[in-house]
Amino acid sequence: METRPSEQLNQRNASFDNRLRPTKFSDFVGQQKIRDRLMLAVEAALQRKEALDHVLLFGPPGLGKTTLAFILGEAMGVHVKTTSGPVIDKPGDLAGLLTSLDPGDIVFIDEIHRMQRTVEEYLYSAMEDFVIDIMIDQGPNARSVRLELPRFTLVGATTRSGLISSPLRSRFGLINRLDYYSTADLAAIVTNSAAKLEVGIDEGGATEIASRARGTPRIANNLLRRVRDYAQVRAGNHISREVADQALSLLEIDPRGLDEMDIRILDTIIQKFNGGPVGLNTLAVSVSEEPDTLEEVYEPFLIQEGYLERTPKGRVATPLCYRRFGLEPLKQQDQQMTFL
């Protein structure tokens, strides 16, 4: 069967991501406290010859939650079976997944907060007692069947920990929040990735890419891929600070990491809504983007960098945002600003 060009592209992208993904704790850069806690838990579990306790990883997209799940599998010497919350639609799907495990295996559920509540309730007994009760047939012939499960480790990942129910959250023994990376850590990641991609890079080039990566390794590697293309065609396959700056300027990513959509959001708040406040849904319609995408992908970085504030009345541009566009903040707008 012939593979479509789009499928070939997806396979190449997946191969690129897997090639750059670290497989051992020693290769994982950043998140030092989380690494130390997980390494300690793994060592203790191996000494006791037990399955690792259940792990919850939460934080913004692209910080390494999936990577850590596979590193845990490698460290424990077990298989990692992956799925996502929306995919597990029925209790039978969950039962089929859990009964196929070997002792000690890891089940990685991405976006676990999007799991159906009826399915989630079946996880409670599976995580605590390693059994699952499923209903067979319907009506008068309905009966409950208890299935024994091998001791396994559930690794849940989510970008919105607040949407995880308290009963599910309380069943995780190790709960870790991943934070944005420093520029120094991202520069180290870019340098390591460049070596794997066989492209030359100096310290200035790595730092330039890292400083525009919004504190996120996934974005840093994606930017590296684009800069690599530029360097291959126009710079002898070597990335210096000047080459990185030229390539990223071509992508319309400014020195502070703001991309085209970031600038559109900020410009819309200033020009169309006099600096705010403006509601999330209204802003989403104005920039032709989904509200969830604005709230989860763009706003965290803009708020962290000090360009945007969330107030009870809506989103407000900060004085720093005005200065970014060479404008003077409105006095009336300054008086209205309040913090959440």
Image (tube, grey):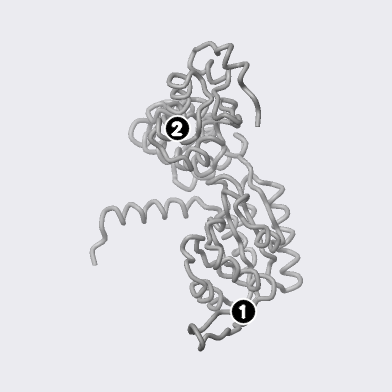
Secondary structure of the residue carrying tag 2 is helix
Query: Which quarter of the figure is the N terminus placed in?
Result: bottom left
**x 40%, y 31%: residue:** 287
Kindly identify which numbered label has been placed on residue 105: none
User: Residue at 38% of width from left, 35% of height from top?
Assistant: 288
Is the residue marked by circle 2 packed among few (<14), some (14-19), or many (20+) residues within 10 Å?
few
* Res 68 → quadrant: bottom right
Location of the C terminus (image quadrant): top right
User: Total marks drawn?
Assistant: 2
- Answer above or below: position of 332 versus 148: above
Residue at 69 percent across and 75 percent down: it is 129
* Residue sitting at x 64%, y 55%: 25
Image position of 173 (left or right of 119): right
Q: Give the x, y percent position of residue 316.
A: 55, 25
Q: Is residue 260 above or below residue 189?
A: above
The residue to which callout 2 is attached is 282
Q: Position of residue 203 (x, y in %)?
A: 55, 32
| Residue 198 drawn at (x, y percent) | 44, 45
Name the front one of labels 1 and 2.
2
Q: Residue furthest front?
A: 140
Q: Which mark is residue 149?
A: 1
Q: Which amino acid type is shown beneath numbered disc 2?
A: Thr
The image position of residue 227, as x and y in percent, is 41, 35
- Furthest-bottom residue in view? 141
Q: CA distance from mark 1 to mark 2?
A: 49 Å
Q: Nearer the viewer, residue 293 or 44?
A: 293
Residue nearer the viewer, 301 or 185: 301
